[in-house]
Amino acid sequence: MPVRIAAAVAALSLIVPSAAAADASTPSTLSVDGSGSVMVTPNVASLSLSVARSAARSSAALSAANRRVAAIVSAVRAAGVPAVGIQTDSIDVSGATVRVGPRRHQHRVRRYTATESLSITSTTSIVGRVIDAATRAGADSIDGPDFSFSNPSAGVVAATNAALADARRRANAAAATLGYSVTGVQSVDLNPQSTVVSPVSAGGGAPGATSTPTTPTHIHPGAEEVDATVAIVYTIAPG
């Protein structure tokens, strides 16, 4: 996995006790901020899909939507999505009065539309065939995929280690320039700022849900950048 060290300017702060106040228990210190980044490939993909059916009666519209959703659930289960990866987001039934018939002979009728939406969570390795299965089963719209990690701390340890190494390199260079050498660590803050996970390349996209795909959908999860920063106070002594 490629590791990329962020090229950020470190904050350096040198504290040297005055000659009058200095004693053996008051070492000079050097404060350094370090940063590091790693690229991590997501392994979880999430989709949102919906179905809408209309009828003259609300119960008929809802029943038609229920049948379509059942077909979609069966299809994505067959594609490898476990039951815990399928969640109902919403069910809505609404009515409206519409005009039907020839232009000069229109009459008003009451129509009901039932809409149901699902959230699907799968591994990135099967999300392409999940999209194809949902499309073939009659999903009216598909939104996604969105990528994430099954391990919430994925990449954080590696990014933190890179930030620690960055801080030590900067401390050594700054101390040497000042005629000092690093002798130890007084304090370490591993989270002076929140660790950031930012998408670099999501790739892929859902096909139109109104047509049956003739070519399998291939999803490219790419990689996401995990950034970490540290703040370290080093003790130093004249070199």
Image: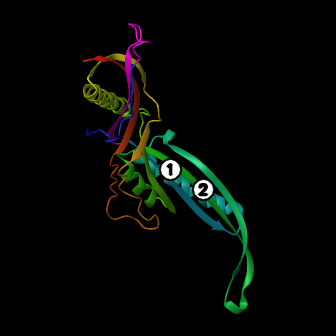
- SS type, badge 2: strand
Residue 109 in picture, x, y percent from top left: 74, 76
Quadrant position of the N terminus in the picture: top left
Image vertical order of residue 77 relative to residue 185, above or below: below
Q: Is residue 170 left or right of residue 142?
A: left
Give the CA distance from mark 2 to mark 1. 12 Å
Q: Which quadrant would residue 159 be assigned to in this image?
A: top left
Q: Is residue 99 visible?
A: yes
Question: Magenta stretch containing residue 224, yes or no?
Answer: no
Image vertical order of residue 218 relative to residue 35, above or below: below
- Disc nearer the start of the sequence (2/1): 1
Residue depicted at x 25% and y 26%: 176
Amino acid type, label 2: Glu
Neighbour class for label 2 at 10 Å: few (<14), some, many (≥20)? Answer: many
Residue depicted at x 42% and y 32%: 153
Residue 171 in picture, x, y percent from top left: 31, 27
| Nearer to me, 35 or 131 | 35
Name the residue that disc number 1 marks: 73
- Find residue 116 and name its label: 2
Residue depicted at x 34% and y 38%: 37
Residue depicted at x 36% and y 50%: 200
- SS type, badge 1: helix
As drawn, the residue found furthest toward the top would be 24
Residue 195 in picture, x, y percent from top left: 44, 36
